[in-house]
Amino acid sequence: MYRALPVILLLLVWFTIGCTMKSGDRCPEEMHYDPEARVCELCDTDQVWDDVNYVCVDTGGDADSDADGDGGADGGPPTGLGEPCDTDADCEGYEASMCAINPLTDEGQYCTLEDCVPADCPDGWQCCDCLAVSALESLACAMEADVSALEFGGCTCS
């Protein structure tokens, strides 16, 4: 019985330290902790970590996402952003490759970025999470004029 006491104490200390560790200290510096899956994630060089949804998000090759304030694209906002569309096929070839429905009218659909983080959306646009209230399968940049209606409908925009 007494021979097992040091092992029991060691296990008790080990479990206590593991339970009190901060999320940010659980992974090496270049990795990010996903508390839902309880794993460390490593994003590719063309991805950034989304702290809200705990996923790596593509930046379209601009590894700094939007550090230069150009919507993730060098030289201006993402190509195709705001272009009128009826289906995703109309947005093909653009960086803004998803056709989003304008929530204010039955018309006025436009090409937008999907799987955005707030820094990906240029001035006049916000990244909106409507996953809980719509059939959208990803976050998307929305025109600021549409944000109030989206938030009223249950989306979260920033």
Image (tube, helix red, strand yellow):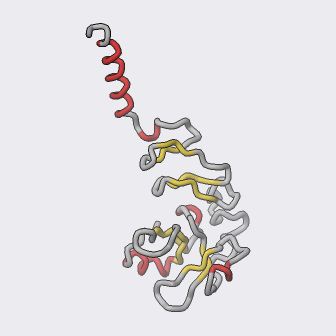
The residue that appears at 59% across and 40% down in the rendered structure is 30
Residue 7 versus residue 150 in the image, above or below? above
Residue 55 versus residue 93 in the image, above or below? above
Look at the image and tell me in which quarter the N terminus lies: top left
On the image, which quarter does residue 120 sit in?
A: bottom right
For the image, the number of numbered tags is 0
The residue that appears at 33% across and 28% down in the rendered structure is 16
On the image, which quarter does residue 4 sit in?
A: top left
Q: Residue furthest top?
A: 3
Q: Nearer the viewer, residue 3 or 115?
A: 3
Q: Residue furthest bottom?
A: 106
Q: Nearer the viewer, residue 136 or 141?
A: 136
Residue 23's x, y, as percent?
A: 43, 41
Residue 37's x, y, as percent?
A: 45, 48
Residue 25 versus residue 120 in the image, above or below? above
Q: Residue furthest left?
A: 1
The residue that appears at 63% across and 54% down in the rendered structure is 47
Q: Is residue 88 left or right of residue 16?
A: right
On the image, which quarter does residue 77 sit in?
A: bottom right
Q: Nearer the viewer, residue 79 or 45?
A: 45
The residue that appears at 43% across and 77% down in the rendered structure is 150
Residue 72's x, y, as percent?
A: 65, 63
Residue 81's x, y, as percent?
A: 64, 76
Q: Is residue 123 left or right of residue 89?
A: left
